[in-house]
Amino acid sequence: MKKLDIITFGRAAVDLNAVEYNMPMEETMTFKKYVGGSPANIAIGTSKLGLKAGMIAKVSDDQHGNFVIDYMNKVGVETSSIKKDTEGRKIGLTFTEIKSPEECSILMYRDQAADLYLSVDDFDEDYIKSAETLLISGTALSQSPSREAALHAMDIAKKNGVEVIFELDYRPYTWKSEAETSVYMTLAARSADIVIGTRDEFNVLENSEGNSDKESVQQLFNYSPHLVVVKHGVKGSKAFTRDGEVIEGDIYKTQVLKTFGAGDSFASGFIYALKKEKGIQEALKYGSAAASIVVSKHSSSDAMPTVEEIEQLIHSQEG
Ligand SMILES: Nc1ncnc2c1ncn2[C@@H]1O[C@H](COP(=O)(O)OP(=O)(O)OP(=O)(O)O)[C@@H](O)[C@H]1O
Ligand SMILES: O=C(O)C[C@@H](O)[C@H](O)C(=O)CO
C-alpha cells in the first residue's frame, strides 16, 4: 500500500478573485483571497474527494506562504514537501476579472515567482516513491530550475513505477517563446502515462494549429501515453486510449458564475474516478460534474466538491 494516492508538482499560489461581478478589473475594488495554482487546486480537489494527496512546491517565506500551507493542511493535503523560498522570492498572485459569466480572465503577477525556483534539491526520491501517481503541471517546465526539477521528478517516478500524469496547464506568462514551450511540453507529454489538456493547449504543444484531436493523440501514442484527454470547454471532452477507444464526455449545465477553475476541478474528479476504477466514461462524468460545480462558485480551490455533491449532480441530470 502506497502512503499517498497522488502527488502534484508545481505552483502553489494565491488567487485574488473579484468580489464584484460584471465589471472590468479596473473598476473592481474588492478581491477575495483563496489558495490557487493549478496543481495546488488539484491536490486540494483530490484531497476533498478523499484521496491521499501530497504536493511538491515552493512558496514564499511570508504570510502568504503560511496561508497556503495552513489551508492545504486544513483540507488534508500532505505538505512536508512544500518548501519555503530562502532567497526572499514571492508567491505568484492571480487576479481574476469577472466581466460576465462568459467573459472571465485572469491576470498573473509571476515575476521571479517562488514556484519557478523549486529545484532538484527540494524533494527526495522516497517522497515520490511513496505515491501511486505524480501529476506534473506544464507551467513548472517554463523556467529553470523548476524545469529540471519537474523533469527529474518525472524520471524518478518512471524508474519506480509511479504513474505520471501530465496536465498541460499552459500559462503564457512565464514562457519565453512558442518554440521553447513546444519543445518542453512535447518532451514531458511523451514521457507521461496520461496527458490532459485543452484543444488550445495541444496546439501550443504542437506549435501549430489545425490538427484534429485524433492527429494529436496519434503522435503521443507512439510514445509512453496510454490515455489522452482533450478538453473542449462547454463542448465537453474526449478521452482517447492507445487501443483505439474514443470516449466522449458531456457537460453538466449549471448557472455559471465564472469559467476559471473548470480545468482543475475536471482533473480532480477525473483522477478520483480513475483511481476508484470506475472506468473512463465514468471518470469523464466525475470530471465534468466537478467542473460544473466549481464554475458555479466563486473560487477554484475552496469550491472543490465532495464525492456526494458530484454524484448527486450526475444522478439528478441522468434522472
Ligand atoms: N460553462 C461550463 N459549464 C459546465 N461545465 C463546464 C463549463 N466550462 C467547462 N466545463 C467543464 O469543464 C471541463 C474543462 O473545461 P475547459 O475545457 O474550459 O478547461 P480549462 O481551459 O483547462 O479550464 P480553465 O478555464 O480552468 O483553465 C469541460 O470539459 C467541461 O466538462
Ligand atoms: O493556475 C493558477 O495559477 C490560477 C488558478 O488558481 C486560477 O484559479 C485558475 O485560473 C484556475 O483555472
Image: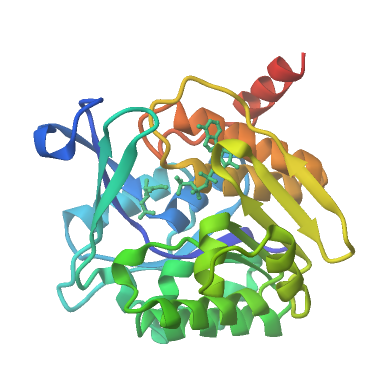
Estimate the x, y position of residue 268 in percent, counting from the top left: 58, 46
- Give the residue at the far front of this rendering: 210
Front residue of 263/45: it is: 263
Considering the image in quadrants, where does the N terminus appear?
A: bottom right
Residue at 62%, 27% in the rendered image = 252
Estimate the x, y position of residue 274 in percent, counting from the top left: 75, 50
Front residue of 73/288: it is: 288
- Give the residue at the far right of this rendering: 243
Residue at 87%, 55% in the rendered image = 245
Q: In this view, does 129 lie above or below 105?
A: below
Residue at 74%, 77% in the rendered image = 224
Estimate the x, y position of residue 138 in percent, counting from the top left: 48, 68
User: Looking at the rendering, which quadrant does residue 163 occupy?
Assistant: bottom right
Q: In this view, does 52 lie above or below 33?
A: below
The answer to whether residue 84 shows anywhere in this view is: no
Left or right, 301 with respect to 115, comes to right
Number of numbered callouts drawn: 0
Estimate the x, y position of residue 196 in percent, counting from the top left: 62, 59
Residue at 77%, 73% in the rendered image = 221
